[in-house]
Amino acid sequence: MRATMGLAKAVMIGATLMLLPTVATAQQTVRIGLGAPTLSFLPIWSARALDTFKTQGLTATVVALPGGDASALAAVDAGDIELAAVGPDAMLRAVAKGQPFQIVYSLMSKVTLQLVVSPALMERTGVKTTDPLEKRLAAMKGALVGATALAGAQEIAARWLAGKGGLNPKTDIKVAQVGNPTAVQAALEAKRIDAFVLSPPEGFLAEKAGSGVVLISLGDEFPLLANQPYLVLVAKKPISPATTELITKTAKALQEASAAAVDKPEQTAEAIQKQFFAKAEPQAITAALKAMRSGVADGGKIDVQSMQNALTFAKEVGTNFGKEFDAKTSEGDLWTNHFVEAAKAK
Protein backbone atom coordinates (compact mmCIF):
# COMPACT_ATOMS: atom_id res chain seq x y z
CA MET A 1 0.00 0.00 0.00
CA ARG A 2 2.83 2.38 0.86
CA ALA A 3 4.33 1.69 -2.57
CA THR A 4 1.03 2.62 -4.23
CA MET A 5 0.81 5.88 -2.29
CA GLY A 6 4.38 6.59 -3.34
CA LEU A 7 3.41 6.00 -6.95
CA ALA A 8 0.62 8.55 -6.77
CA LYS A 9 3.03 11.04 -5.25
CA ALA A 10 5.60 10.30 -7.93
CA VAL A 11 3.07 11.06 -10.65
CA MET A 12 2.28 14.44 -9.11
CA ILE A 13 5.91 15.35 -8.47
CA GLY A 14 6.94 14.18 -11.91
CA ALA A 15 4.24 16.28 -13.54
CA THR A 16 5.42 19.37 -11.72
CA LEU A 17 9.17 18.98 -11.99
CA MET A 18 9.65 17.44 -15.42
CA LEU A 19 8.01 20.19 -17.46
CA LEU A 20 11.23 21.20 -19.17
CA PRO A 21 11.70 22.39 -22.76
CA THR A 22 11.72 19.72 -25.45
CA VAL A 23 15.28 19.40 -26.72
CA ALA A 24 15.41 20.37 -30.36
CA THR A 25 17.37 22.45 -32.84
CA ALA A 26 14.33 24.12 -34.37
CA GLN A 27 14.30 27.75 -35.40
CA GLN A 28 10.89 28.43 -33.88
CA THR A 29 9.88 28.17 -30.25
CA VAL A 30 6.33 27.73 -29.04
CA ARG A 31 5.65 28.53 -25.40
CA ILE A 32 2.74 26.74 -23.74
CA GLY A 33 1.51 27.39 -20.21
CA LEU A 34 -0.33 24.60 -18.39
CA GLY A 35 -3.15 25.45 -16.02
CA ALA A 36 -2.42 22.18 -14.18
CA PRO A 37 0.23 19.49 -14.77
CA THR A 38 -2.17 16.56 -15.17
CA LEU A 39 -2.09 13.62 -17.55
CA SER A 40 -5.41 14.76 -19.01
CA PHE A 41 -3.37 17.13 -21.19
CA LEU A 42 -2.46 13.96 -23.06
CA PRO A 43 -1.54 15.41 -26.49
CA ILE A 44 1.07 17.69 -24.93
CA TRP A 45 2.70 14.90 -22.93
CA SER A 46 2.63 12.61 -25.96
CA ALA A 47 4.02 15.22 -28.35
CA ARG A 48 6.92 15.98 -26.05
CA ALA A 49 7.67 12.33 -25.29
CA LEU A 50 7.54 11.34 -28.97
CA ASP A 51 9.31 14.53 -30.11
CA THR A 52 6.66 15.39 -32.70
CA PHE A 53 7.27 19.08 -32.07
CA LYS A 54 10.73 18.62 -33.52
CA THR A 55 9.37 17.08 -36.72
CA GLN A 56 7.39 20.30 -37.23
CA GLY A 57 10.47 22.45 -36.77
CA LEU A 58 9.51 23.54 -33.27
CA THR A 59 11.05 23.70 -29.86
CA ALA A 60 8.28 23.43 -27.27
CA THR A 61 8.69 25.08 -23.89
CA VAL A 62 5.95 23.82 -21.58
CA VAL A 63 5.56 25.28 -18.10
CA ALA A 64 3.06 24.55 -15.33
CA LEU A 65 2.24 28.00 -13.97
CA PRO A 66 1.46 28.60 -10.29
CA GLY A 67 -2.03 29.99 -10.06
CA GLY A 68 -3.63 27.58 -12.51
CA ASP A 69 -5.78 28.54 -15.49
CA ALA A 70 -5.99 32.21 -14.56
CA SER A 71 -2.20 32.53 -14.53
CA ALA A 72 -1.86 30.74 -17.86
CA LEU A 73 -4.40 33.06 -19.48
CA ALA A 74 -2.72 36.12 -17.96
CA ALA A 75 0.59 34.98 -19.44
CA VAL A 76 -0.99 34.69 -22.89
CA ASP A 77 -2.55 38.12 -22.50
CA ALA A 78 0.84 39.59 -21.55
CA GLY A 79 2.59 37.93 -24.49
CA ASP A 80 4.82 35.81 -22.26
CA ILE A 81 3.53 32.64 -23.92
CA GLU A 82 1.71 31.92 -27.17
CA LEU A 83 -0.76 29.32 -25.90
CA ALA A 84 -2.51 28.45 -22.64
CA ALA A 85 -3.60 24.88 -21.97
CA VAL A 86 -6.62 25.31 -19.70
CA GLY A 87 -10.18 24.31 -18.99
CA PRO A 88 -12.69 26.26 -21.10
CA ASP A 89 -14.58 27.68 -18.12
CA ALA A 90 -11.76 30.03 -17.11
CA MET A 91 -11.39 31.19 -20.69
CA LEU A 92 -15.12 31.83 -21.07
CA ARG A 93 -15.18 33.90 -17.88
CA ALA A 94 -12.29 35.97 -19.21
CA VAL A 95 -13.98 36.48 -22.58
CA ALA A 96 -17.19 37.53 -20.84
CA LYS A 97 -15.15 40.30 -19.21
CA GLY A 98 -13.89 41.46 -22.59
CA GLN A 99 -10.54 39.69 -22.88
CA PRO A 100 -9.65 38.72 -26.49
CA PHE A 101 -9.13 34.96 -26.28
CA GLN A 102 -9.96 32.19 -28.74
CA ILE A 103 -10.00 28.40 -28.41
CA VAL A 104 -7.77 27.04 -31.17
CA TYR A 105 -7.55 23.31 -30.29
CA SER A 106 -9.37 20.79 -28.12
CA LEU A 107 -6.71 18.93 -26.13
CA MET A 108 -9.20 16.58 -24.46
CA SER A 109 -12.63 16.17 -26.02
CA LYS A 110 -14.34 14.31 -23.19
CA VAL A 111 -14.65 14.69 -19.45
CA THR A 112 -11.97 12.41 -17.97
CA LEU A 113 -13.24 12.33 -14.36
CA GLN A 114 -14.09 9.00 -12.72
CA LEU A 115 -16.19 8.29 -9.65
CA VAL A 116 -14.18 5.95 -7.44
CA VAL A 117 -15.91 4.40 -4.41
CA SER A 118 -14.75 2.31 -1.47
CA PRO A 119 -15.47 -1.42 -1.14
CA ALA A 120 -17.34 -0.53 2.06
CA LEU A 121 -19.76 1.69 0.16
CA MET A 122 -20.34 -1.05 -2.40
CA GLU A 123 -21.00 -3.59 0.33
CA ARG A 124 -23.28 -1.20 2.24
CA THR A 125 -25.38 -0.34 -0.80
CA GLY A 126 -25.12 -3.64 -2.66
CA VAL A 127 -24.12 -1.80 -5.83
CA LYS A 128 -21.99 -3.48 -8.50
CA THR A 129 -19.98 -2.07 -11.38
CA THR A 130 -22.25 -4.01 -13.75
CA ASP A 131 -25.45 -2.45 -12.42
CA PRO A 132 -27.44 0.02 -14.53
CA LEU A 133 -26.17 3.58 -14.34
CA GLU A 134 -29.22 4.72 -12.38
CA LYS A 135 -28.53 2.25 -9.57
CA ARG A 136 -24.84 3.17 -9.44
CA LEU A 137 -25.73 6.85 -9.16
CA ALA A 138 -28.31 6.21 -6.44
CA ALA A 139 -25.60 4.47 -4.39
CA MET A 140 -24.06 7.90 -3.75
CA LYS A 141 -26.80 8.77 -1.25
CA GLY A 142 -25.22 9.59 2.10
CA ALA A 143 -21.67 9.30 0.73
CA LEU A 144 -18.80 11.47 1.90
CA VAL A 145 -16.81 12.48 -1.17
CA GLY A 146 -13.21 13.60 -0.76
CA ALA A 147 -11.91 16.45 -2.91
CA THR A 148 -8.68 18.36 -3.38
CA ALA A 149 -10.59 21.63 -2.92
CA LEU A 150 -14.14 22.73 -2.17
CA ALA A 151 -16.33 24.27 -4.88
CA GLY A 152 -13.94 22.99 -7.54
CA ALA A 153 -14.46 20.67 -10.50
CA GLN A 154 -14.55 17.55 -8.32
CA GLU A 155 -17.29 18.78 -6.01
CA ILE A 156 -19.24 20.18 -8.95
CA ALA A 157 -19.04 16.84 -10.77
CA ALA A 158 -19.97 14.84 -7.67
CA ARG A 159 -23.08 16.91 -7.00
CA TRP A 160 -24.03 16.82 -10.69
CA LEU A 161 -23.80 13.01 -10.57
CA ALA A 162 -25.98 12.91 -7.47
CA GLY A 163 -28.60 15.00 -9.24
CA LYS A 164 -28.52 12.67 -12.25
CA GLY A 165 -29.21 9.81 -9.86
CA GLY A 166 -32.39 11.44 -8.58
CA LEU A 167 -30.75 12.59 -5.35
CA ASN A 168 -30.72 16.03 -3.83
CA PRO A 169 -27.25 17.26 -4.87
CA LYS A 170 -27.06 19.68 -1.96
CA THR A 171 -28.09 17.41 0.91
CA ASP A 172 -27.81 13.77 -0.14
CA ILE A 173 -24.01 13.77 -0.41
CA LYS A 174 -21.29 15.51 1.59
CA VAL A 175 -18.00 16.82 0.23
CA ALA A 176 -14.87 17.27 2.32
CA GLN A 177 -11.63 18.98 1.36
CA VAL A 178 -8.86 16.44 1.85
CA GLY A 179 -5.84 17.69 -0.07
CA ASN A 180 -3.89 16.57 -3.12
CA PRO A 181 -4.65 13.27 -4.89
CA THR A 182 -2.17 11.40 -2.71
CA ALA A 183 -4.02 12.60 0.40
CA VAL A 184 -7.36 11.69 -1.19
CA GLN A 185 -6.09 8.17 -1.90
CA ALA A 186 -4.89 7.84 1.70
CA ALA A 187 -8.25 9.04 3.02
CA LEU A 188 -10.09 6.43 0.96
CA GLU A 189 -7.73 3.70 2.18
CA ALA A 190 -8.23 4.80 5.80
CA LYS A 191 -12.02 4.78 5.28
CA ARG A 192 -12.33 8.46 6.17
CA ILE A 193 -14.17 9.10 2.90
CA ASP A 194 -16.47 6.93 0.79
CA ALA A 195 -15.54 8.15 -2.66
CA PHE A 196 -13.66 10.63 -4.81
CA VAL A 197 -13.96 12.07 -8.31
CA LEU A 198 -10.60 12.37 -10.08
CA SER A 199 -9.08 11.72 -13.50
CA PRO A 200 -6.83 8.75 -14.34
CA PRO A 201 -4.59 7.26 -13.11
CA GLU A 202 -6.19 7.73 -9.67
CA GLY A 203 -8.90 5.13 -10.25
CA PHE A 204 -6.31 2.59 -11.39
CA LEU A 205 -4.18 3.28 -8.32
CA ALA A 206 -7.13 2.81 -5.97
CA GLU A 207 -8.12 -0.44 -7.62
CA LYS A 208 -4.57 -1.77 -7.47
CA ALA A 209 -4.35 -0.86 -3.79
CA GLY A 210 -7.71 -2.51 -3.11
CA SER A 211 -9.01 0.68 -1.54
CA GLY A 212 -11.45 1.68 -4.29
CA VAL A 213 -13.31 0.73 -7.45
CA VAL A 214 -14.06 2.83 -10.52
CA LEU A 215 -17.86 2.89 -10.43
CA ILE A 216 -18.53 5.48 -13.14
CA SER A 217 -16.34 6.95 -15.88
CA LEU A 218 -18.18 10.17 -16.62
CA GLY A 219 -17.02 10.71 -20.19
CA ASP A 220 -17.84 7.14 -21.17
CA GLU A 221 -21.37 6.96 -19.75
CA PHE A 222 -22.93 10.37 -20.38
CA PRO A 223 -23.28 11.49 -24.01
CA LEU A 224 -23.15 15.12 -22.88
CA LEU A 225 -19.71 14.53 -21.35
CA ALA A 226 -18.38 12.21 -24.06
CA ASN A 227 -18.19 14.94 -26.68
CA GLN A 228 -17.09 18.36 -25.50
CA PRO A 229 -13.86 20.41 -25.33
CA TYR A 230 -12.89 19.61 -21.74
CA LEU A 231 -9.32 20.94 -21.99
CA VAL A 232 -8.31 23.42 -24.68
CA LEU A 233 -5.52 25.50 -26.16
CA VAL A 234 -6.23 29.22 -26.04
CA ALA A 235 -4.55 32.02 -28.01
CA LYS A 236 -4.91 35.79 -27.87
CA LYS A 237 -6.64 37.65 -30.69
CA PRO A 238 -5.87 39.10 -33.11
CA ILE A 239 -3.63 36.24 -34.23
CA SER A 240 -0.82 37.45 -36.48
CA PRO A 241 0.30 35.54 -39.60
CA ALA A 242 3.49 34.46 -37.80
CA THR A 243 1.55 33.15 -34.80
CA THR A 244 -0.94 31.48 -37.16
CA GLU A 245 1.92 29.48 -38.65
CA LEU A 246 3.23 28.63 -35.19
CA ILE A 247 -0.17 27.43 -33.94
CA THR A 248 -0.72 25.36 -37.10
CA LYS A 249 2.63 23.61 -36.62
CA THR A 250 1.80 23.05 -32.96
CA ALA A 251 -1.57 21.56 -33.91
CA LYS A 252 0.12 19.21 -36.37
CA ALA A 253 2.57 18.03 -33.70
CA LEU A 254 -0.30 17.40 -31.29
CA GLN A 255 -2.29 15.54 -33.95
CA GLU A 256 0.62 13.23 -34.75
CA ALA A 257 1.16 12.51 -31.07
CA SER A 258 -2.56 11.94 -30.48
CA ALA A 259 -2.70 9.45 -33.37
CA ALA A 260 0.16 7.55 -31.77
CA ALA A 261 -1.66 7.53 -28.42
CA VAL A 262 -4.74 6.05 -30.08
CA ASP A 263 -2.94 3.52 -32.31
CA LYS A 264 0.00 2.59 -30.09
CA PRO A 265 -1.07 3.24 -26.50
CA GLU A 266 1.49 0.98 -24.82
CA GLN A 267 4.45 2.44 -26.69
CA THR A 268 3.25 6.00 -26.21
CA ALA A 269 2.63 5.46 -22.50
CA GLU A 270 6.09 3.94 -22.13
CA ALA A 271 7.67 6.99 -23.75
CA ILE A 272 5.73 9.36 -21.47
CA GLN A 273 6.57 7.35 -18.37
CA LYS A 274 10.29 7.09 -19.11
CA GLN A 275 10.71 10.79 -19.88
CA PHE A 276 8.42 12.42 -17.35
CA PHE A 277 7.40 9.89 -14.68
CA ALA A 278 10.46 7.71 -14.21
CA LYS A 279 9.46 6.79 -10.64
CA ALA A 280 5.88 5.93 -11.54
CA GLU A 281 4.73 2.42 -12.35
CA PRO A 282 4.43 2.05 -16.15
CA GLN A 283 1.08 0.28 -15.75
CA ALA A 284 -0.45 3.39 -14.17
CA ILE A 285 0.51 5.61 -17.09
CA THR A 286 -0.67 2.99 -19.61
CA ALA A 287 -4.01 2.63 -17.83
CA ALA A 288 -4.50 6.40 -17.77
CA LEU A 289 -3.67 6.76 -21.46
CA LYS A 290 -6.04 3.97 -22.49
CA ALA A 291 -8.85 5.49 -20.41
CA MET A 292 -8.42 8.88 -22.06
CA ARG A 293 -7.32 8.15 -25.64
CA SER A 294 -10.83 8.37 -27.09
CA GLY A 295 -10.75 12.02 -26.06
CA VAL A 296 -7.91 12.79 -28.47
CA ALA A 297 -9.09 10.73 -31.45
CA ASP A 298 -10.52 13.74 -33.33
CA GLY A 299 -7.21 15.55 -33.53
CA GLY A 300 -8.30 18.69 -31.71
CA LYS A 301 -11.50 19.30 -33.65
CA ILE A 302 -14.42 21.19 -32.13
CA ASP A 303 -17.87 21.35 -33.69
CA VAL A 304 -21.05 23.18 -32.83
CA GLN A 305 -22.53 20.21 -30.98
CA SER A 306 -19.45 19.57 -28.85
CA MET A 307 -19.18 23.25 -27.97
CA GLN A 308 -22.88 23.35 -27.14
CA ASN A 309 -22.40 20.29 -24.91
CA ALA A 310 -19.75 22.16 -22.95
CA LEU A 311 -22.03 25.18 -22.54
CA THR A 312 -24.98 22.98 -21.56
CA PHE A 313 -22.93 21.13 -18.94
CA ALA A 314 -21.68 24.42 -17.52
CA LYS A 315 -25.27 25.61 -17.19
CA GLU A 316 -26.39 22.34 -15.58
CA VAL A 317 -23.74 22.61 -12.87
CA GLY A 318 -24.63 26.24 -12.20
CA THR A 319 -21.64 27.97 -13.77
CA ASN A 320 -22.26 31.65 -14.43
CA PHE A 321 -19.86 33.15 -16.94
CA GLY A 322 -21.43 36.58 -16.73
CA LYS A 323 -22.51 36.36 -20.35
CA GLU A 324 -24.55 34.01 -22.52
CA PHE A 325 -22.64 32.20 -25.26
CA ASP A 326 -24.06 30.48 -28.33
CA ALA A 327 -22.01 27.66 -29.83
CA LYS A 328 -23.04 28.24 -33.43
CA THR A 329 -22.78 32.01 -33.69
CA SER A 330 -19.50 32.09 -31.75
CA GLU A 331 -17.64 29.92 -34.25
CA GLY A 332 -14.74 31.87 -35.71
CA ASP A 333 -14.74 34.22 -32.74
CA LEU A 334 -14.88 32.29 -29.48
CA TRP A 335 -13.60 29.08 -31.04
CA THR A 336 -12.25 27.92 -34.39
CA ASN A 337 -11.18 24.83 -36.31
CA HIS A 338 -9.00 26.87 -38.66
CA PHE A 339 -5.73 25.62 -37.18
CA VAL A 340 -6.91 22.03 -36.79
CA GLU A 341 -7.97 21.87 -40.43
CA ALA A 342 -4.84 23.58 -41.67
CA ALA A 343 -2.70 21.15 -39.68
CA LYS A 344 -4.56 18.15 -41.08
CA ALA A 345 -3.91 19.46 -44.59
CA LYS A 346 -0.15 19.71 -43.98
Image (spheres, helix red, strand yellow):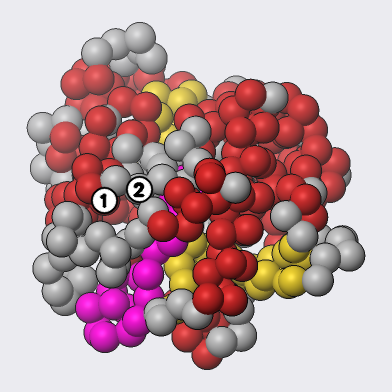
The first of marks 2 and 1 along the sequence is 2
Disc assigned to residue 302: 2
- Residue in view at x 29 percent, y 46 percent: 303
- Residue 64 location, quadrant: bottom right
Q: How far apart are the two marked residues, 2 and 1, measured between alpha carbons?
A: 7 Å
Q: CB under 8 Å between callouts 2 and 1?
A: yes
Which residues, given as a range, are shown in magenta?
91-108
Q: Nearer the viewer, residue 81 or 146?
A: 81
Q: Is residue 275 visible?
A: yes
Instruction: Tell me if I can see residue 192 in this picture.
Output: no
On the picture, is 99 further left or further right than 288? left
Q: Residue at x 74, y 48 (%)?
A: 52
Tell me residue 119's x, y (percent).
Answer: 46, 22
* Left or right: 233, with 57 as reference point: left
Picture quarter with the N terminus: top right
Whether the magenta-drawn stretch holds residue 95 is answered as yes
User: Amino acid type of disc 2?
Assistant: Ile
Mark linked to residue 130:
none
Callout 2 environment at 10 Å: few (<14), some (14 to 19), or many (20+)?
Answer: many
Which residue does the numbered mark 1 point to in the structure image? 307
Which of discs 2 and 1 lies nearer the camera? The answer is 2
Amino acid at circle 1: Met
